[in-house]
Image (tube, helix red, strand yellow):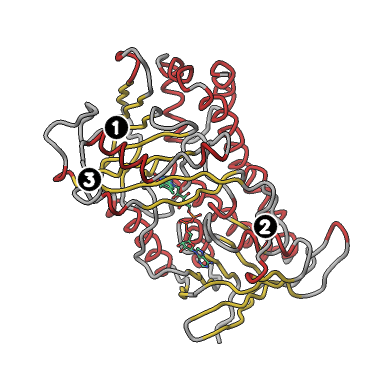
Amino acid sequence: MTSYDVLIAGAGPAGCAAAYDLARAGKRVLLLDKRTFPRHKACACGLTRKTLKALRYSVEPIVERVCHEIVLQQAASNASQRALRVRTRNPICAMAVRERFDDFCLQQTLAAGADLRKIEGIVSIRETGSLREAAYLHAGTNGVEIDIATAAGIETLSAPFMIGADGSNGQTRRLAEGLRTSGEATAAALPADPQWYARAFALEATVPYAALPATLPGGDSPHDLVFDFAPLPGGYGWLFPKGDHINIGVGAFAPADEAQLKSATRTLLAEYAQAKLGVATLTDSGLAKITGQYLGMGGFAYVPRGRVLLAGDAAGLVDSLTGEGIHSAIVSGQAAATAILASMDTGRRANVAEEYAKRLRPLQETLAFSHRAAQAFYKQPARGFRVMRIPLLRSLVLKTYSDGLQSAKLLGVLAKIVA
Ligand SMILES: Cc1cc2nc3c(=O)[nH]c(=O)nc-3n(C[C@H](O)[C@H](O)[C@H](O)COP(=O)(O)OP(=O)(O)OC[C@H]3O[C@@H](n4cnc5c(N)ncnc54)[C@H](O)[C@@H]3O)c2cc1C
């Protein structure tokens, strides 16, 4: 039986980013996923420049379109105030189809030397070795042991480290929470989510260009990249143009309460598609394939502990202003890998959580900033739109979305203006 240095639950962007770096560094890595790839994942798969930059390899073969223009829309009585079309010199966002993007990244990761196994789920997680008392509880453990359910039955795997990259609906975050108070956590008695964790929700569907009327009722061009803040509170509707179809969706990314979280529904998306794209029924447009998923938020307050590190949506690292999560997934997966490599190199394996916390902090600071900006923006999007009409501030916001937060201080000023 192969022994592994790191077990990774989830082979999405976070899991693959971690596995890729670990495998390239010569570590034995096993990815565990419930699904068989290529697999569908509800996602608009807009890849910002910072996402493309964070990846260790080019994903050009699966990029279907590159957008230099963005259309921002809002509910406004005055037609001239409703939309803002901005063209930029550098591309804002690359468009891909998530199923192909994930499969491409997985193939790169397997080629780098990682292994993959399909599992039915994780049955239990244990921290092994000597337990220390009080504040250092579990810090002195030797590793992680997990029971996995497979088609052939229950099997036990162990490794010095584990990364939970199993997304917003995964089990590892809750199992890791159970390990805070006990040496073992089981799926049969799954602990509650940690307090810092919050949820957003979004739905998407694809509409082939061939199914569209000659003129779109919303006045958009079929190849427009649209962010529309009119259809629901605490979030936006979108049109993301791909090679042969539009990905249309609605998401409540910074819901103020449970009612706003639940306002992103299939019915809303079907009505939105009718209003924007003129597609009449669910079946004539491909909208029958509406899929939705929770997004993991609140991770700016996540504090890593023990030998089970969380990354991506499992760690609540989606940006609340934009709903963008692939960038955080990649960056956090890579940070977890670097932390593991550092603690293995120095022989101080018990310090891995500390190492990870240090490397995750810049991303968490950016997300905390975004969270504050989202709270101000979604309270009154019209005020945010006023800011976006000022060319300097607009280019700053777009640069931040596309390239990352390099101008934190300037954006702090912007957040104050919006508020
Ligand atoms: C409708 C929608 C649109 C979005 N659009 C965008 C966008 O345009 N751009 C963007 O950047 N972000 C977008 N996001 C967010 C983005 O999809 C996520 O942030 C991103 O997928 C997080 O990656 P991850 O690797 O953490 O998790 P995931 O991509 O969710 O991967 C988790 C993996 O874990 C596996 N898994 C789950 N449970 C288990 C288990 N118990 N055991 C083993 N494996 C398990 C799953 O099968 C999956 O393969 C969108 C989200 C939604 C819902």
Q: Are marks 2 and 3 in contact (CB under 8 Å)?
A: no
Q: In this view, does 222 lie above or below 163?
A: above
User: In the image, is 325 to the left or to the right of 367?
Assistant: left
Residue 177, given in percent of the width and then of the height, sits at: 70, 59
* Ligand 1 has an atom within 8 Å of the beta carbon of the residue at disc 1: no
User: Which residue position holds label 2?
Assistant: 192
Residue 379, given in percent of the width and then of the height, sits at: 54, 24
User: Which residue position holds label 1?
Assistant: 68
Disc 2 to disc 3, how far (Cα)?
39 Å
Residue 375, given in percent of the width and then of the height, sits at: 57, 29
Secondary structure beneath dot 3 equals: loop
Disc 3 to disc 1, how far (Cα)?
32 Å
Q: Is residue 415 above or below residue 160?
A: above
* Residue in view at x 37 percent, y 46 percent: 266
Which labelled disc corresponds to residue 164? none
Q: In this view, does 45 lie above or below 37?
A: above
